[in-house]
Amino acid sequence: MVRTLTGILVLAILGVTGIRTPEVAAGTAPDLILHDAVVLTMDPSAPTVSALAITGDRIVAVGSDEEVLALAGPGTSVVDLDGLTVTPGFIDSHAHWIGDRELYGLSTPQEAIQAALEAGWTSLNEMFVNQDRLDELGALDAAGELRVRVNAYLPVNYGTDQKFGFWFSELTPGAQLGPRLRLAGAKFFIDGCGPETYYLSEPREDGNLGQFNWRRRGLRRLVAEVHEAGWQISAHTCGDGATDEILDALELAFGDEDGARFRARLEHLIVIRDDQLRRMRRLGVSPSIQPTFVDTSWTRDLKQVFSPDRLELFGRWRDIADDPRLHTIGSTDTPYGEGPNLQPSSVMDTLVQATTKKARPDDRVPRWMREQRLTLEQALGLLTTGGAYGVFAEEDLGMLAPGMLADLVVWSEDPHQVPKLELERIEALMVFVGGTLEVCTPAVEALCPA
């Protein structure tokens, strides 16, 4: 997303960090001020403040109550949140909320959008958008019914026999098709994603390598063609053998260019080796992981197929997130992140699984899994700043700071103050997208601004 002229002017007026100068009040007063809150900004220069101000679709100030309230004018709506918690809007960077809604029991896209908003998500990366789904999203946006931001990833294939090709070659990569719909990238499915179908570099105990969806030469040719046309490449790769294949293809496509410019992303990375992480750093390729994956609900199936020594390579979320050079992205893969039940994942569901690796509260977590639990701060970062980086939007999304888009969620409690296994009790009470109130629950109806 490209920052608007308004956003640039706001930044120029307001300065660099903390509360931005009181001269703002001498120009145009904010439309909305939220104060008396625990505002978790995800901005390292001011991690926690108590108030913020919004004008139009942008945040114009953050700081203390005293500082931000001083900016109010006669037309400013001022909301006292009485200690509630505010975070940036969360980004579900790999999901199928709208496209696969029928799999989790919803029949209309409007229902799916409402469910995502109520779960705390303000941006969705829809990771399988064919022409029919693109037309549907475009119609929703044109009608003002696309109430979340959507980045569309267009598939070139699915299984071994489902090759769609470069069907979107006449479209413009990165194009903003409407207020909330953007063409983000091209999606390659490299392998299957089950214990029997991950494509591995070494065979399972039964001698099976898994499912490779391509002929090597064809994969490399199409990756190069799509890259040359300017598309960000996203690749579904679950096994380490599949990761070898797509890294080879990307390295050939990038040639002498700096790969970090293109932000190619590898989705899932269920099985990953150290040498592959080093190679991803060198190529500037980002891991796009699902903290909802590889929890205790997976233990039995994995143990039936893989020897204990190989389980150390599965679900290495902490190893990946600990390296800031990898620019890790987090998501849910809704509705597939909750296992065979095919249910959507809320932000708080995701934080529980990320930080505990438990599918059920009483589950025993094996050692190799315990070592890969994320900290709460890591999990929050993957779903905010990490997600923004993944779609070239770090100057607009992922933080609550002056000049950023006013995508934010008001929560019933601060997740730092709640035991990890109880995080799901935290409710999204208000959800704003671009300064527009999209969700107001009955519990706070008296507080919600018009």
Image (spheres, rainbow, N blue to C red):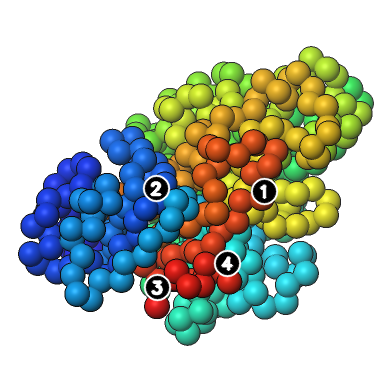
Q: CA distance from mark 3 to mark 1?
A: 26 Å
Q: Earlier in the sequence, mark 2 or mark 3?
A: 2
The residue at 32%/52% (across/down) is: 51
Q: CA distance from mark 4 to mark 3?
A: 14 Å
Q: Earlier in the sequence, mark 4 or mark 3?
A: 4
In front: 127, or 339? 339
**Which residue is label 3 attached to?**
449
The residue at 28%/36% (across/down) is: 45
Q: CA distance from mark 1 to mark 4?
A: 17 Å
The residue at 44%/65% (across/down) is: 432
Res. 424 mark? 1
Res. 39 mark? 2
Q: Amino acid at mark 2?
A: Val
Q: Is residue 344 left or right of residue 187?
A: right
Above or below, 207 against 424 in this view is above
Q: Earlier in the sequence, mark 3 or mark 1?
A: 1
Q: Earlier in the sequence, mark 2 or mark 4?
A: 2
In the rendered image, is residue 353 in sight?
no
* Circle 2 SS class: strand
* Circle 4 SS class: helix
